């Protein structure tokens, strides 16, 4: 991958995300134009049902579905872009302005020990970081996600807790490997303020599960508790009688 590939992919992600949100807001067609009998079409239907009558969730699902359609049409794979396409506009917790921004990211699971930043292989860990001070008291953040490759989907709350029983604003999701489209939105309560996070959309690549090597052959071992076997002594010459010689008496 050369130095121009990643910026180009980042620009493509931002353009696709902006187009999807534009469509979800009604200035373009918000209906996902994907066949209903495909994995993506089935996943979109499941997401829509899970959203119910929650208009914010329905908008996020529409953005997710529109992005999935555009990803499939563009043939994008291996995005390799971990932040969301843009920071989420956030209302209610700005200092000098009535709004601020919330950075959101997701980290694909990796093999090896848990380092606190990513989960096991085949998972995606979502994280939000509002541009405000103080410890959050409650999280109403959610992620609507859809794996374009395997059709898995869900609306998942970012409800993990820190060691101090405060919102971590994070969640690890078992998406399976493939290209994942996700929309993040919701609310965060701080002392004296509530942040309303408007949707942001992103594309993420979850790596394939590592291949399991075949078990190595176990060499034969000798049981140390088994008694040792003494080798038999070589056989001597056959016994032909007494070693002396004698003569018989003649009568």
Image: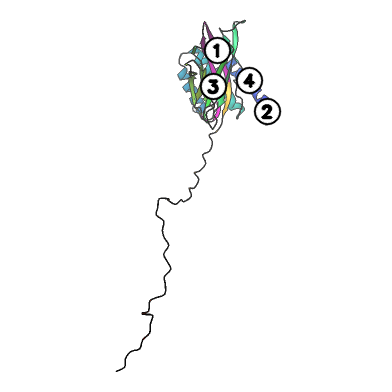
Q: CA distance from mark 2 to mark 1?
A: 30 Å
| Residue lying farthest to the bottom in this orientation | 251
Q: Secondary structure at mark 3?
A: strand
Of badges 3 and 2, the one in the foreground is 3
Q: CA distance from mark 3 to mark 4?
A: 18 Å
Instruction: Give yes or no for residue 190 being in the magenta stretch.
Output: yes
> Taking the image as drawn, is residue 38 in sight?
no
Of badges 3 and 4, the one in the foreground is 3
The residue lying at 55 percent from left, 17 percent from top is 128
Determine which residue is flagged by label 1.
197
Determine which residue is flagged by label 4.
14
Q: Mark 4 and mark 2 in contact (Cβ < 8 Å)? A: no
Foreground of the two, 228 or 87: 228
Mark 4 is surrounded, within 10 Å at the Cα level, by few (under 14), some (14 to 19) or many (20 or more) other residues, namely some
Q: Earlier in the sequence, mark 1 or mark 3?
A: 3
Foreground of the two, 52 or 1: 1
Q: Is residue 3 left or right of residue 215?
A: right
Determine which residue is flagged by label 3.
126
Q: CA distance from mark 4 to mark 1?
A: 18 Å
Q: CA distance from mark 3 to mark 2?
A: 24 Å
Residue 156 coordinates in the image, percent (x, y)? 48, 20
Which residue range is magenta in the image? 176-201
Quadrant showing the C terminus: bottom left
Instruction: Give yes or no for residue 116 being in the magenta stretch.
Output: no
Q: Which mark is residue 55?
A: none
């Amino acid at each position: 991958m050369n130095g121009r590939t990643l910026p180009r992919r980042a620009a493509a992600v931002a353009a696709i995300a902006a187009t999807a949100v534009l469509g979800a807001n009604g200035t373009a067609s918000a209906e996902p134009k994907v066949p209903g009998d495909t994995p993506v079409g089935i996943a979109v239907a499941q997401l829509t049902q899970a959203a119910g009558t929650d208009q914010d969730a329905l908008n996020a699902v529409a953005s997710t579905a529109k992005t999935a359609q555009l990803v499939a049409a563009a043939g994008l794979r291996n995005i390799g872009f971990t932040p969301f396409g843009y920071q989420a506009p956030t209302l209610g917790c700005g200092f000098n302005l009535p709004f601020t921004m919330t950075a959101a990211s997701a980290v694909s699971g990796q093999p090896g020990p848990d380092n606190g930043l990513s989960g096991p292989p085949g998972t995606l860990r979502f994280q939000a970081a509002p541009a405000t001070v103080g410890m959050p008291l409650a999280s109403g953040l959610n992620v609507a996600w859809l794996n374009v490759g395997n059709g898995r989907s869900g609306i998942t709350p970012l409800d993990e807790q820190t060691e101090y029983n405060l919102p971590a604003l994070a969640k690890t999701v078992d998406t399976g490997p493939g290209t994942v489209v996700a929309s993040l939105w919701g609310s965060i309560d701080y002392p004296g303020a509530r942040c309303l996070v408007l949707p942001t959309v992103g594309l993420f690549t979850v790596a394939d599960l590592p291949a399991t090597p075949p078990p190595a052959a176990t060499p034969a071992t000798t049981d140390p508790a088994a008694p040792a076997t003494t080798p038999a002594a070589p056989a001597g010459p056959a016994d032909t009688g007494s070693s002396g010689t004698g003569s018989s008496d003649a009568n």
